[in-house]
Image: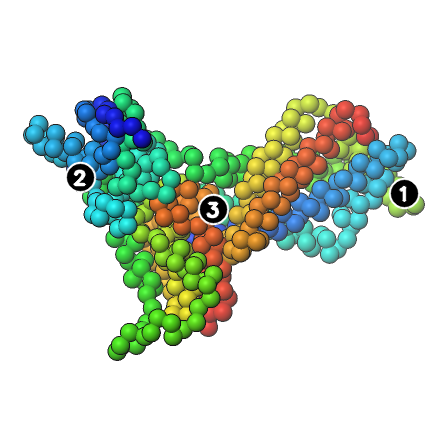
Amino acid sequence: MTWKQVFTSSVGKKLVMGLTGISLVLFLIVHAGINACVFADLANPNENGEMFNKAAHFMGSTVLIRLMEIGLFAGIILHIYQGYLLTLENNQKRAVGYAVTYKDGSKWYSRSMGLLGTLILIFLILHLYHFWVSARFTHKGLEPVTYNGVEMHNMFGLMKATFSEWWIIAVYTAGCISLAYHLAHGFQSAFRTMGVYNNRYTTMLTSVGYAYSIIIALAFILMPLSFKLGWIG
Amino acid sequence: MEHYHMNLNLKVWRQKNSKTKGDFKTYQVKNISSEMSFLEMFDVLNEQLITEGEEPVAFDHDCREGICGMCSMYINGKPHGPWQANTTCQLHMRAFKDGDTIVVEPWRANAFPVIKDLTVDRSSFDRIIQAGGYISVNTGNAVDGNALPINKDNADNSFAAAMCIGCGACVAACKNSSAMLFLSAKVSHLALLPQGEPERKSRVMNMVAQMDKEGFGACTNTGACEATCPKEISLTNIARLNSEYLSASLSADK
């Protein structure tokens, strides 16, 4: 059994989805953690995004993290490519469909991972355009800011400017809700795919997965909303 | 439970053979006893069709006591009908009321081509078993059952997996037409016992390869298979299969 045979089998393809999925789950913890620095404004009104800007600067200027970013993009692309490939292949396995579909045995979001993933992808393109493209390449809407003699991008200012329009907040909220449902299935499913079968872990991972999905989505939804409602910034 | 009679409308999938296109035909059956089994109701329908000079509906059945895995039928949008942990042959007409319309379809999956009407070809399951669902034993007298110590949990889990009757409801229920619940039951059944040890790695590799060759989809852990399985085979077996597959591929020689 060669590696190629392993990773192109139906179980192997799912292993790729699970592995990349878990790496993205880990990424989201870092992403939410760094971004939560914007809430430092709540405690200190004179903060004006200093903690967040410094954290963003650290992430953008550290070589190791930039290298990890390459891995992250590779993971996302592989997850998207393999996800669509699996969805397409699986959909072709039943040429004649049922007149009455079986819905009671599974959750709607478990059956709709392809659709939820597509919604997240649409959101992701807009999100990367707003922040990643601007920070890395165009510097559109980015003012310089200096702390202790070090000049850096005012990402906090860019967030404030971006989240001044309701339609953007609506799209971000929809993206995060899609993400929550995608994770509600994906989190526990990834571990099952990786071969975690012991009941003591599967029950725990399912609960942790639900909690994780809700916390991550709420944390991200709160950010644009807090800017718009003037709680921060 | 009170005994009653009912008249029913049946929307049944009719298909001449695997080459032709099928469609639904509607039939009425009258005075059906609530104590009949679903298949007995179909026997009544077929008697009626024969009397009227029509072709009877072809459907699979054998033991009619819920243990052989031969009966199929996708009834009102669920394999084996509305009851839990139940086969079509053990589905009784008290599950329905007078005037109900019942939609009956065959298992639908490319790997289960329709032979005729509600009968599908499930020999792909046989070929998956042939690829590795066996153990090697020495010839001669049967070994004493208690000669090998087996811990109780493994014996219980193995037996629970061995309950799979290979009916194919998991494939019929799965949105991906995946055979993973079936395959995982067969792999788990033997992987949990010392007798399964010699072929442990080659078994899972070969059986997965055969499953893919037969044209079943990949598992996305939706759980529809577990919910419809007449023998309540647990989704845990699929995770165990993944674990078996991963460790077999990581420790493969080349």
Q: Position of residue B126 (x, y in %)?
A: 27, 56
Q: Nearer the viewer, residue A81 or B221?
A: B221
Location of residue B44 (image quadrant): top left
Q: Position of residue B120 (x, y in %)?
A: 24, 44
Image mark 1: chain: A
Identify which residue is drawn at 70% across, 44% down: A31
Q: Residues within 10 Å of mark 2 (few under 14, many from 20)?
A: some
Look at label 3 and name its amino acid: Asn
Q: CA distance from mark 3 to mark 2?
A: 33 Å
Identify which residue is drawn at 26% across, 78% down: B140
Image mark 3: chain: B
Q: Earlier in the sequence, mark 3 or mark 2?
A: 2
Answer left or right for B4 relative to A49. Answer: left
Answer left or right for B57 relative to A145. Answer: left
Identify which residue is drawn at 76% across, 44% down: A34
Location of residue B211 (image quadrant): bottom left
Look at label 2 and name its amino acid: Ala
Q: Position of residue A95 (x, y in %)?
A: 32, 39
Q: Is residue A6 visible?
A: no
Look at label 1 and name its amino acid: Tyr
Q: Which residue is mark 1?
A: A147
Q: Which residue is mark 2?
A: B58
Q: Residues within 10 Å of mark 1 (few under 14, many from 20)?
A: few
Q: Is residue B165 visible?
A: yes
Identify which residue is drawn at 22% across, 23% down: B7
Q: Residues within 10 Å of mark 3 (few under 14, many from 20)?
A: many
Q: Mark on residue B221?
A: 3
